[in-house]
Amino acid sequence: MLGAPGAGKGTQAKLISGRFGIPQISTGDILRDNVARSTELGKQARAVMERGELVSDQLVCGMVADRLAHKDCERGCILDGFPRTVRQAKWLDQYLDARTFAGRKLPPVVIMIQVGYNQLLQRLTGRRSCPTCGRIYNVNSQPPRVAEVCDVEGASLIQRKDDKEEVIFERLKEYERQTLPLVEYYREQGRLHELDGELPADQVTAKILTLIERPAAQAGSND
Ligand code: AP5
């Protein structure tokens, strides 16, 4: 799942994960969990994330390799926020070349969620999430039933540290510099599907489901 910060990768990955019963692997969530627990990895990643920069390819690829080795990935998984550099994408290609899932090869379906700059800013500054279940809300477009309280858990919603305006600008710059080149990388491989992420979330989900159900046939489409 490719897209700028705030494009809706996490929102969609959670929905698709529930639908197919395969795990969502969010490198951002794994890193934040490590930061919260002050693990060695978290200590190395913390300052980098707070500045809005990318954590090193070596750390992130090692972390993804560990996660993909878990049994729940046997039928596939949704990679949310990974790869996001060309080096990470090359690492993933090699990994997938060498690996089978329940005895068969699983070529990646690359979905790029497109959202304009102003909309991204509005989404990121308005985002809130539940510290207990991870559910994502938005004070503007997807508010909880009671302000600042999770509909399911009743917990007080939190705002991510990197959703401050100055950090958001850095994250968007990093995205343009390091992640946008992946669009060309996957387009050349004929794997890229681009979606209009400004549609309501349920319409974006419907388009993603169609793509996953007919992956190889329509690569290169603008849906
Ligand atoms: P990460 O956690 O991956 O953050 P990100 O890529 O910046 O993406 P976000 O989580 O901010 O946005 P999203 O696209 O998931 O949007 P969401 O669904 O929440 O990474 C954080 C940091 O970790 C990085 O900066 C880096 O330091 C490090 N990192 C992570 N992966 C790395 C890697 N591979 N390599 C190196 N470093 C790495 O939606 C946003 C808001 O919009 C929500 O409020 C939601 O409710 C709303 N919304 C969603 N869809 C819609 C819609 N269709 N209409 C209206 N509102 C919507």
Image (cartoon, rainbow, N blue to C red):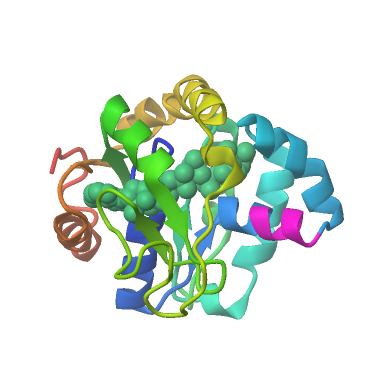
Query: Relative to the observer, which residue lies in front, 138 or 80?
Result: 138
Residue at point 21%, 63% (across, down): 209
Residue at point 66%, 47% (across, down): 61
* Residue 112 position by quadrant: top left
Say whether residue 81 is magenta.
Answer: no
Please indicate whether residue 15 sits to the left or right of residue 129 in the image. Answer: left
Q: Would residue 122 be visible to someone looking at this image?
A: yes
Q: Residue furthest front?
A: 147
* Residue 3 position by quadrant: top left
Task: Provide the residue span drawn in magenta.
Answer: 32-37
Q: Residue furthest right?
A: 40
Query: Relative to the observer, which residue lies in front, 63 or 185?
Result: 63
Label the magenta part by its dominant secondary structure.
helix
User: Looking at the picture, how far across and down is residue 24, in whole percent?
Assistant: 47, 65
In the displayed structure, would residue 108 be above or below residue 2? Answer: below
User: Looking at the picture, how far across and down is residue 80, in whole percent?
Assistant: 46, 53
User: Looking at the picture, how far across and down is residue 16, in whole percent?
Assistant: 32, 67
In the displayed structure, would residue 175 be above or below residue 57? Answer: above
Say whether residue 35 is magenta.
Answer: yes
User: Looking at the picture, how far across and down is residue 68, in whole percent?
Assistant: 60, 65
Query: Relative to the observer, which residue lies in front, 166 or 192?
Result: 166
Please indicate whether residue 169 sits to the left or right of residue 14 in the image. Answer: right
Q: Would residue 91 be visible to someone looking at this image?
A: no
Query: Relative to the observer, which residue lies in front, 160 or 25?
Result: 160
* Residue 132 position by quadrant: bottom right
Residue at point 13%, 44% (across, down): 223
Please indicate whether residue 54 sits to the left or right of residue 193 in the image. Answer: right
